[in-house]
Image: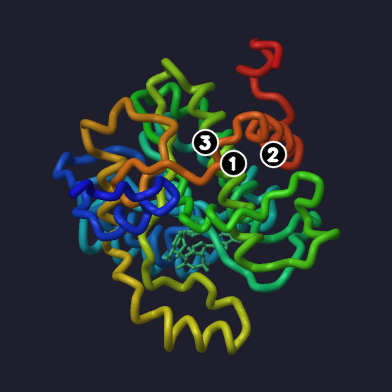
Amino acid sequence: MAKHRVPDELMFLVNRRAVQKTTDAPLTGKVCVISGATSGVGLSAARRLASGGAHIVLVCRNHEKAEGVRRELAAQHGVPVDIVIADFSDLDTVRRAGEVLLRDYPRIDVLINSVGLHSTSRILSPAGFELVFCVNHLGPFLLTHLLLEPMRQSAPARIIQVNSEGHRFGGLDLEDLDWKRRRYKGLKGYGASKVAQLLTVWEFADRLKGSGVTINAMHPGDVRTNIGNNNGPLYRWWLHNVTWHVLKDPIISGEALYYLAAAPEMAEVSGRFFHLTIDEKPAAPALDRELGRRVWDLSLEMTGLFRVPEDREAGR
Ligand SMILES: NC(=O)c1ccc[n+]([C@@H]2O[C@H](COP(=O)([O-])OP(=O)(O)OC[C@H]3O[C@@H](n4cnc5c(N)ncnc54)[C@H](OP(=O)(O)O)[C@@H]3O)[C@@H](O)[C@H]2O)c1
């Protein structure tokens, strides 16, 4: 009997149960910058990368929490661990963190952006951006841009944006990024930020072609972290009493990020979306390259970057 093919849009259901790839390739001495490393996916990645010998740079908003992570990693793995402070809801602090990183690290081998949140209500950042869009997309977009040059100098180097299957919720409307005209819905706001990030990953990948720097996005699994804890009591009750039981240990996210950051077979793979470690086709809106070019331009404008040298040279 002919086997039914699973439609592309549902492959994440297959991939979440698949055996994931791993690697033992070391990262000894490699400078790995990780945002959102005080909790959940980013923390798990920091632990796994430190166990592989990496020099870890934590980009975090809370110095006390980051200091706890620094002490743990240094004690358990004996690797250098540094802290750079940035609040991704305030892009000026991300810009300053970029300046510190440029000044202090002549080489950066790996950048992992795991910073993120999910909000059930519409909140605006100090500069007036919708908070989830700002923290999940604009902040990582800005940090990635600021580190492109040292990463080019350090090539081969790898960038990994922690994205989400939540991009399938959609919600991206370039005419209403701040949700002034629509009623805000948490899943849609989250989806919008993740679609925007995916679209810019393809744009980054095009611009980085031939540079030795790769960029990919990944879904870190459905894992037990602090995400959503900023929301109201009903949401938190649901999260901890219902969803919690089907979520997995974020150790799988750290292992997958290690694979993407260190596996020799990943050295030249760029511009892809991975469900943990499995290459997967994203939802249609995240593959709309015309929309992607508009998101790219808007993101440059919103982060105050305007045009990058590659675009100027190419007359874009
Ligand atoms: N958990 C999942 O099942 C899942 C599924 C798909 C995708 N993801 C993605 O995985 C990434 C990490 O999320 P998580 O699940 O690990 O959640 P988490 O445990 O809440 O970790 C989020 C991290 O982001 C940091 N962060 C949040 N807002 C920030 C801000 N304004 N400035 C600087 N740092 C900020 C947090 O810092 P503090 O410690 O200071 O709060 C924390 O380090 C996110 O991009 C999320 O969308 C998670």
Q: Residue 160: horizontal and vertical position, in percent?
A: 42, 42
Q: Is residue 80 left or right of residue 119?
A: left
**Residue on which the image places disc 1:** 141
Of the two numbered discs 1 and 3 in the rendering, the one whose residue sits closer to the viewer: 3
> Gap between marks 2 and 3, in whole Å?
12 Å
Q: Give the residue furthest to the right.
A: 181
| Residue at point 34%, 50% (across, down) | 6
**Residue on which the image places disc 2:** 299
Return the mark for residue 201. 3
Q: Residue 98: horizontal and vertical position, in percent?
A: 57, 40
Residue count near mark 1 (Cα–Cα under 10 Å), binned few <14, some 14–19, many ≥20: many
Disc 3, SS: helix
Disc 1, SS: helix
Quarter of image, res 297: top right
Quarter of image, res 159: top left
Q: Is residue 263 left or right of residue 12?
A: left
What type is the residue that disc 1 sits on? Phe
Q: Contact (CB < 8 A) between labels 1 and 3?
A: no
Q: Contact (CB < 8 A) between labels 1 and 2?
A: yes
| Residue at point 31%, 47% (across, down) | 5
